[in-house]
Amino acid sequence: MAAIITPDRARIATRSACRTIAPVGFCHVAPAYGVTGDPWFEFDARVCHLSLAVVSKCFDHDPSVIAILDEAQFLGRRVRVARTEPTGDITIRLSLNPDAAPEIALANPQALALLDGLGIDRMVAGMVPMTELRRRLTDPRIRRRLDSDPDIAESIETLGTMAALKPIEGEYLLAWI
């Protein structure tokens, strides 16, 4: 299910989501590519921490958009806003991503130490399926190596939370760049 929205409504929603960062401490918009003025763009928006009335106001309380926002809040998922063709419509639909998915932001030395500790080739940017991350986190040899480094202890806890997430369909991936 998807609803069509106007470019103005997409911009208003993005600006509104960006203004809510300060009170809650995290960003509500996770860009995939482009920005709302580009011919192609796509982003996920977190809506579960916001009032349905406040979010739907950005879309003139359009009933088709409200249905998507309501479902996203009920299921604890983000919404996806996208224009996938230069002259195509802008759509809003349910995202596959959970609203409260944990993220890790590390400086390069800590990120490299974490990849090394997990036994992942740090020379290649990429992704690891969560099943592989779960396997590595439960491997006693790898776990001892990870637990011996106090600089990445907090990250290990977050990785465990990530690994415990169950996707709606398919499989989540741990991605790094």
Image (cartoon, rainbow, N blue to C red):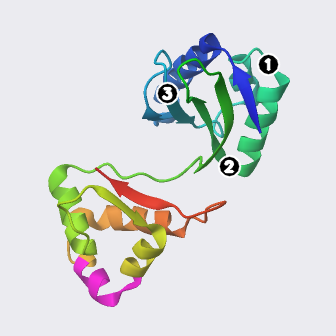
Residue annotated with mark 1: 61
Q: Horizontal and vertical percent for residue 67?
A: 82, 34
Residue 131 higher or lower than 152, as above or below? below
Horizontal placement of 122 versus 92: left or right? left
What amino acid is labelled 1 in the image? His
Horizontal placement of 77 versus 157: left or right? right
What amino acid is labelled 3 in the image? Phe
Where disc 1 sits, the SS reads loop
Separation of disc 1 and disc 2 at Cα? 20 Å
**Image point (27%, 77%), residue name:** 147
Membership of 139 in magenta stretch: yes
**Image point (61%, 21%), residue name:** 88
Horizontal placement of 13 versus 26: left or right? right
Q: Horizontal and vertical percent for residue 165?
A: 56, 64
Residue annotated with mark 2: 76
On residue 16, the disc is none
Residue annotated with mark 3: 41
User: For the residues carrying marks 3 and 2, which lies nearer the camera in this image?
Assistant: 3
User: For the residues carrying marks 3 and 1, which lies nearer the camera in this image?
Assistant: 3
Q: Which residues are magenta?
A: 138-145
